[in-house]
Image: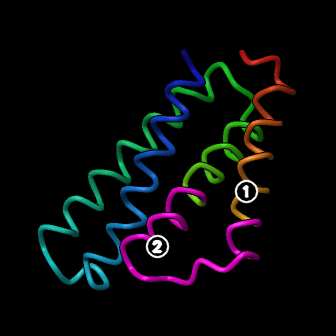
Amino acid sequence: MSWYLLLLAGLFEIGWAVGLEYSDGLTKPWPTLGTVVSLVISMVLLAQAVKDLPVGTAYAVWTGVGAVGTASLGIVLFDEPATLARVACIGVIVVGIVGLHLASGGH
């Protein structure tokens, strides 16, 4: 269950990171509210996940999920470059996330 909470926390991390772009430096009220709510939910879920997972593993996976999702959405939503090097680096992060999950025994 902790891994699911951690994945969900990572998805909300993507939400608040992307929300920063839409909030225009936290100057637009509704996007700012969504960003703050996503941030709080992400932190609460991460806190729940580290009850059962090592904090180093959980934090690395949380930031990895957030980085992969945010970089991918940056390409799709904000026309950020999708160079081979950039996509390959995103892939390396995915491999790292999977590796951490497997190295922990998946629990």
Residue holding disc 1: 91
Image coordinates for residue 94, horizontal then vertical, percent:
71, 48
What residue is disc 2 on? 74
Residue stretch rendered in magenta on the structure = 68-88
Residue 83 shown left or right of residue 104 in the figure: left
On whether residue 76 falls in the magenta region, the answer is yes
Give coordinates of residue 105: x percent, y percent.
82, 17
Q: Nearer the viewer, residue 29 or 10?
A: 10
State the residue in front, 83 or 56: 83
Left or right: residue 60 compared with residue 48:
right
Image side of residue 32 versus residue 103, left or right: left
Is 59 left, or right, of 38 in this rendering? right
| Residue farthest toward the right in the current orientation of the protein | 103
Which quadrant holds the N terminus? top right
Give the crowd class for mark 1: few <14, some 14-19, many >=20 residues within 10 Å: few
Query: Looking at the image, which residue is at 56% across and 83% down?
Result: 81
Tag 2: residue type? Answer: Gly
Whole-angstrom CA distance, mark 2 to mark 1, is 15 Å
Q: Are marks 2 and 1 in contact (CB under 8 Å)?
A: no
Out of 64 and 57, give the one closest to the viewer.
64
Residue 83 percent location from the top left of the image: 66, 80
* Numbered disc 1: secondary structure: helix
Task: Based on the picture, tell me whether residue 7 belongs to the magenta stretch.
Answer: no
- Image-quadrant location for residue 59: top right
Relative height, residue 42 to residue 24 (above, below)? above
Q: Residues within 10 Å of mark 2 (few under 14, many from 20)?
A: some
Looking at numbered disc 1 in the image, what kind of residue is underneath it? Answer: Gly
Q: Residue at x 61, y 22 (%)?
A: 51
Earlier in the chain: of badge 2 and badge 1, it is: 2
Q: Depth check: 96 or 24 in front?
A: 96
Label 2 element class: helix
Q: Residue at x 36, y 72 (%)?
A: 77
